[in-house]
């Protein structure tokens, strides 16, 4: 690890040296760009685009492009990129991570590479940590892009139930009078947002759009263009902290909860050994003849039996409920296999005895146990689509990131994303004073000391920002402060927009702000608070009123300056950490809130031996040291050895979490390969690939398999009747092939004959329903087979993953089991799709529905001879219920 960091420092110096000549070149171009008229500056974009077409590369035009952006920024928002910001911009263009401290102006840095990379005509994405920043940053930087003739959009999650996939375009010609903050945001569609040159949005929105696109049944529903270039802001947060939970689009499984209850009531009336038997070793139960008869009688009485025998296919569903209920009753014991807590059934880990919160037995067993215990039956949700952030972001042709804290995680960025970290120096020297940690014996004494310190600083006027590791701890501290009568604000990353407003004022005299680490991310804490904005002359018709407003602003500006100067004299913003976080990176982020852009500032962390990270890793050593040194309750210690131990503990935890994430990626890589294949197939289908040849070859394969199964063995009598029966599930039988004729033929002949017949039948159908309809039907049948089986595959892989863990006990690496079995699952997925397509294609019909006024005619493939229930999934594959889709 240390060696790794050592070589990082050397190569970083070299990296920076290499950037210097480029920065010099951009600087030397500046006077020329300053001379350009606005129109000439705007025309540069077209010139660059033309030069790219003529063979120049992005690297060739980088210096001029950056000079153009710098000039546009100076003219529009009044900020001229510093030299270090140009360096950051180059690093981002190179597809690396630029580590730039908080307040160094990363929002502005990103405009350089984003502009450059859109010149090829492909869209670029800027990924923000929250939806507020997705709007703020697009709007804030909007004028720069606009001056250069580019379009910029923002996508964000719905802010109210009425909003569906919201998106806005920055457009100065549009004014929304009601929106005082962002009046020039014109509402657009998601697709339009992706058609813009640059799109700002959160990682979730980008990821979900990708998943939704790959569930679309028509290309026109796609919103994203091919993923070209993305810059991830606060990259450590998105690619490391959030990388542990994948994105999931899920739907509730359709289930009849009442059935669980019925069976839970019936099954206890059966007698063990007489009505059912238990195989303890296999963890299985079996119904006996007598048990079956009883159940059938009871079910018939309740009108639930669709056919006389419980094992009749018509009763298939019931059978499942019965088996689960019996297992739940006879095999699963409360307080051994599971416990019931707060109305929930929680599994007990069979090896460790730990409660496995959030885990559920699969395939209805959990619900059966819930019914047995008479608690609320939770609906199983099924995964329709899922991807990890790791794999989503790896889809981009080029990926870059920026953050204040990346270096400690350089190894992970490199290994998982192949992203190099370059540490960019600050614009002005950093003069914040980081005091050594104070260590207390217990948490209570620690918080008391923190409160005392805050009180002192508050009285003196120094603004204080206090970081906590959880909402709970924030509230604990807030209570203590309330009791002492110290006014303060509490932020916990719930309402990004409101909190942004509060954090912007956290630098005022005497301000006390308690915040969890994500709260107010991306918002600058300015000493003295937000600077008053200069009024605009054009907003005032009346000269007198304008003068009045101008005076008011000048007074406010003076007051702000006085407050600002006073805080500088007080030593700037003081940051208090109330606990060491598990990762050093998060602590550094908190510290980085102070001392920005050369401001004075200070920080200190308070630690207790009861803190999680200390207790779990290395607490004993520190405690031993404190006992040895004879410290009493209230005296804190400040000792480099202790600080070192804590840092070592953090390094250990970081490593531990890295392993977990690496594991997640290893597992996800298996499904990812499947996803790539399936999504690529879907895409080809939507793009109008020739499916006919493909489907006919699937038909050939199925015929060969079926013939082989019935007549393929030399040892056995050919089973003509069985063959005919199976073939009938594919297409209508032909009188030519009957038991008589078949028994005269060799398997090869049968196969050839059948393939011939299948081909003719296909052509005949095509004639009947028309070529265009046949193509449409091929597409719908394929999509439906892929989508429904892919969904099942995801669920199966999920279960497999949970079970693979059990193999760890048997000295087999779970991942090995998972990969091997996963491969088999994938093969059966492909086989399943083939089967499904072949067994549907000869049976579906196209029905053209009368189009309601104004709506496009909709056509759906409906299995012939079968009515679709109104509540069934629509056969067009939309995923909606039939009554809400084609059956409307
Ligand atoms: P970061 O994301 O790196 O923490 P921000 O992008 O939020 O920083 O910018 C911090 C502050 O610095 C903002 O108020 C911004 O206006 C200001 N700033 C950034 N770059 C410049 C510049 N070149 N000239 C003047 N002000 C700048
Ligand atoms: Mg930022």
Image (spheres, grey):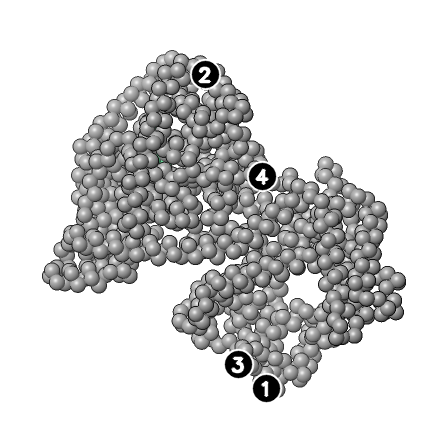
Q: Tell me, yes or no, if residue 859 can be seen here.
A: no
Tell me which label, 2 or 4, sits earlier in the chain.
2
Q: Residue at x 61, y 62 (%)?
A: 255
Q: Residues within 10 Å of mark 2 (few under 14, many from 20)?
A: some
Q: Name the residue nearer the viewer: 840 or 539.
A: 840
Whether residue 322 is visible here, answered yes or no, is yes
Q: Earlier in the sequence, mark 1 or mark 2?
A: 2
Cα–Cα span, label 2 and label 4? 33 Å
Relative depth, front residue between 390 and 324: 390
Q: In screen coordinates, is 171 left or right of 233?
A: right
Residue density around tag 3, few if under 14, some if 14–19, many if 20 or more, within 10 Å: few
Residue labelled with disc 4: 223
Q: Quadrant of ligand 1?
A: top left
Q: Residue furthest bottom?
A: 274
Look at the numbered disc 2 and say if its residue's Cβ is closer than 8 Å to ligand 1: no
Report helix, strand or loop for mark 2: helix
Indicate the secondary structure of the residue bearing disc 4. loop
Mark before the other along the chain sequence, 2 or 3: 2
Q: Which residue is mark 2?
A: 38
Q: Residue 508 is drawn in which quadrant? A: top left
Cα distance, mark 3 to mark 1? Answer: 13 Å
Q: Tell whether label 3 touches label 4 (CB within 8 Å).
A: no
Q: Residues under labels 1 and 2: Cα distance?
A: 91 Å
Residue bearing the label numbered 3:
280
Residue 325 is tagged as: none
Ligand 2 contact, mark 3 (Cβ < 8 Å): no
> Given the current orientation, which residue lies at the most extreme left position?
630
């Amino acid at each position: 690890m240390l060696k790794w960091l050592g070589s990082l420092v050397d190569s970083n110096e070299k990296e920076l040296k290499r950037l210097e000549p480029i920065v010099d070149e951009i600087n030397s171009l500046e006077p020329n760009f300053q001379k350009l008229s606005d129109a000439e500056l705007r025309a540069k974009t077209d010139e660059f685009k033309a030069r790219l077409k003529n063979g120049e590369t992005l690297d060739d035009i980088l210096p001029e492009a950056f000079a153009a952006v710098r000039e546009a920024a100076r003219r529009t928002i009044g900020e001229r990129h510093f030299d270090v910001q140009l360096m950051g911009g180059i690093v981002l263009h190179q597809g690396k991570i630029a580590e730039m401290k908080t307040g160094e102006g990363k929002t502005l840095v990103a405009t350089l590479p984003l502009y450059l990379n859109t010149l090829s005509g492909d869209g670029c994405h800027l990924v923000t940590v929250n939806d507020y920043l997705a709007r703020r940053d697009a709007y804030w930087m909007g004028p720069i892009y606009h001056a250069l003739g580019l379009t910029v959009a923002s996508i964000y999650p719905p802010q109210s139930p009425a909003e569906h996939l919201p998106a806005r375009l920055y457009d100065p010609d549009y004014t929304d009078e009601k929106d005082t903050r962002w009046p020039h945001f014109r509402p657009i569609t998601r697709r339009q947002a992706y058609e813009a040159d640059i799109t700002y949005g959160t990682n979730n929105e980008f990821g979900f759009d990708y998943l939704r696109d790959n569930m679309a049944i028509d290309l026109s529903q796609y919103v994203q263009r091919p993923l070209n270039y993305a810059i991830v802001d606060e990259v450590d947060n998105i690619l490391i902290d959030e990388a542990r939970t994948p994105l999931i689009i899920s739907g509730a499984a359709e289930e009849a909860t009442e059935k669980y209850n019925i069976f839970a009531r019936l099954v206890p009336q059966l007698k063990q050994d007489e009505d059912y038997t238990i195989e303890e070793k296999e963890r299985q139960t079996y119904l006996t003849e007598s048990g079956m008869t009883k159940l059938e009688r009871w079910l018939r009485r309740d009108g639930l039996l669709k056919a006389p025998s419980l094992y009749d296919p018509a009763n298939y569903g019931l059978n499942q409920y019965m088996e689960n209920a019996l297992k739940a009753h006879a095999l699963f014991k409360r307080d051994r296999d599971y416990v019931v807590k707060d109305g929930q059934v929680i599994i007990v880990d069979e090896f460790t005895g730990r409660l496995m919160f959030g885990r559920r037995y699969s395939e209805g067993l959990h619900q059966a146990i819930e019914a047995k215990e008479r608690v609320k039956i939770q609906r199983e949700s099924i995964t329709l689509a899922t991807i990890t952030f790791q794999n989503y972001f790896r889809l981009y042709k080029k990926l870059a990131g920026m953050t204040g804290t990346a270096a400690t995680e350089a190894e992970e960025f490199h290994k998982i994303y192949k992203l190099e970290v370059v540490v960019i120096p600050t614009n002005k020297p950093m003069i914040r004073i980081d005091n050594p940690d104070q260590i207390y014996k217990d948490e209570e004494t620690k918080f008391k000391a923190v409160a005392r310190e805050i009180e002192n600083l508050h009285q003196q006027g120094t603004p204080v920002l206090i970081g906590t590791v959880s909402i709970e701890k924030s509230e604990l501290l807030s209570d203590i402060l309330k009791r002492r009568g110290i006014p303060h604000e509490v932020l916990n990353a719930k309402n990004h927009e409101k909190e942004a407003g509060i954090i912007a004022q956290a630098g005022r005299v005497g301000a006390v702000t308690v915040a969890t680490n994500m709260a107010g991310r991306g918002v600058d804490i300015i000493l003295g608070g937000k600077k008053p904005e200069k009024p605009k002359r054009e907003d005032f018709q009346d000269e007198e009123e304008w003068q009045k407003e101008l005076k008011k602003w000048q007074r406010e500006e003076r007051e702000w300056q006085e407050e600002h100067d006073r805080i500088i004299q007080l030593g700037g913003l003081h940051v208090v950490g109330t606990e060491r976080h598990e990762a050093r990176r998060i602590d550094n982020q908190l510290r980085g809130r102070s001392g920005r852009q050369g401001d004075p500032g200070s920080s200190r962390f308070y630690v207790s031996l009861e803190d999680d990270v200390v207790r779990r890793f290395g607490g004993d050593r520190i405690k031993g040291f404190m006992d040895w040194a004879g410290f009493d309750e209230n005296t804190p210690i400040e000792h480099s050895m202790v600080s070192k131990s804590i840092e070592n503990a953090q390094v250990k935890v970081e490593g531990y979490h890295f392993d977990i994430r690496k594991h997640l990626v290893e597992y996800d890589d298996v499904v990812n390969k499947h996803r790539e294949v399936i999504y690529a197939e879907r895409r080809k289908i939507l793009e109008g690939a020739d499916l006919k040849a493909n489907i006919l070859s699937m038909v050939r394969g199925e015929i060969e398999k079926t013939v082989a199964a019935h007549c393929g063995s030399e040892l056995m009598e050919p089973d003509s009747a069985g063959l005919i029966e199976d073939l009938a599930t594919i297409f209508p039988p032909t009188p030519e092939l009957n038991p008589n004729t078949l028994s005269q033929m060799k398997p090869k002949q049968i196969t050839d004959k059948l393939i011939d017949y299948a081909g003719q039948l296909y052509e005949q159908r095509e004639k009947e329903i028309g070529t265009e309809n046949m193509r449409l039907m091929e597409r719908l049948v394929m999509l439906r087979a892929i989508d429904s089986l892919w969904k099942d595959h995801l669920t199966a892989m999920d279960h497999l993953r949970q079970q693979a863990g059990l193999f760890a006990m048997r000295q087999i690496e779970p991942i090995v089991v998972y990969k091997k079995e996963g491969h088999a699952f994938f093969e059966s997925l492909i086989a399943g799709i083939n089967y499904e397509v072949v067994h549907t294609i000869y049976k579906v019909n196209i029905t053209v529905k009368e189009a309601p006024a104004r709506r496009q005619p909709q056509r759906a493939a409906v299995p012939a001879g079968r009515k679709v229930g109104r509540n069934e999934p629509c056969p067009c594959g939309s995923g909606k219920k039939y009554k809400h889709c084609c059956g409307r």
